[in-house]
Amino acid sequence: MQRTLVLLKPDCVQRRLMGTVISRFEDKGLNIVAMKMLQVTPELSRAHYAEHVDKPFYPSLEAFITAAPVVAMVVEGLEVISVVRDMLGATSGLKAAAGTIRGDYSSSRQMNLVHASDSEASAQRELDLYFEPSELCDYAPVIVPYLRAGDEG
């Protein structure tokens, strides 16, 4: 079982698409084990996007991510990192396939609604930035036997 960080970005919050996006993850059978709304600070932005801080586009990225609240979630499931990224589609909503979250709701590269960790190492680093261990609620939904076979995790 893997965990990943998912951020519903300011454009998702402002456009009132939070419930729609959360429903997509739940409909897929993924488990949300923590969720909170917060305002990303410039400091948190720099920590989260550390690899981009020195790039020319970073100032606009920081301005965007700090402009309005985000919803941070810990999402759990089998191969959840790749599953969530596949559900999101290409980074640019203009290039994302129909049926993906970005393909259905975004028409921008930066305003692409959702961030999701791209690897296990990134997921752990990002989860540690946004959540304390005490904020995670481990539980097994009663529908799990109807979502996957017992030998699948």
Image: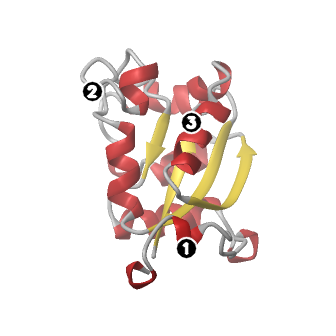
Q: Is residue 142 left or right of residue 105?
A: right
Q: Are marks 3 and 1 in contact (CB under 8 Å)?
A: no
What residue would you read off at disc 3? 21
Among the two numbered marks 2 and 3 on one chain, the one whose residue lies closer to the N terminus: 3
Quarter holding the N terminus? bottom left
Picture coordinates of residue 57 (x, y %)? 34, 28
Residue type indicated by callout 3: Val
Q: Nearer the viewer, residue 16 or 52?
A: 16
Position above or below: 9 against 81: above
Picture coordinates of residue 141 (x, y %)? 67, 69
Residue type indicated by callout 1: Pro
SS for callout 2: loop
Q: From the viewer's perspective, is the residue at label 3 or at label 1 nearer?
A: 1
Position above or below: 11 against 51: above
Please say whether residue 8 is visible from this viewpoint: no
Residue type indicated by callout 2: Ala
Residue 122, image quadrant: bottom left
Please say whether residue 18 is visible from this viewpoint: yes
Residue 138, image quadrant: bottom right
SS for callout 3: helix
Q: Residue furthest left?
A: 95
Q: Name the disc covering residue 97, or none.
A: 2
What residue would you read off at disc 1? 145
Residue at 55% from the left image edge and 33% from the top image edge: 65
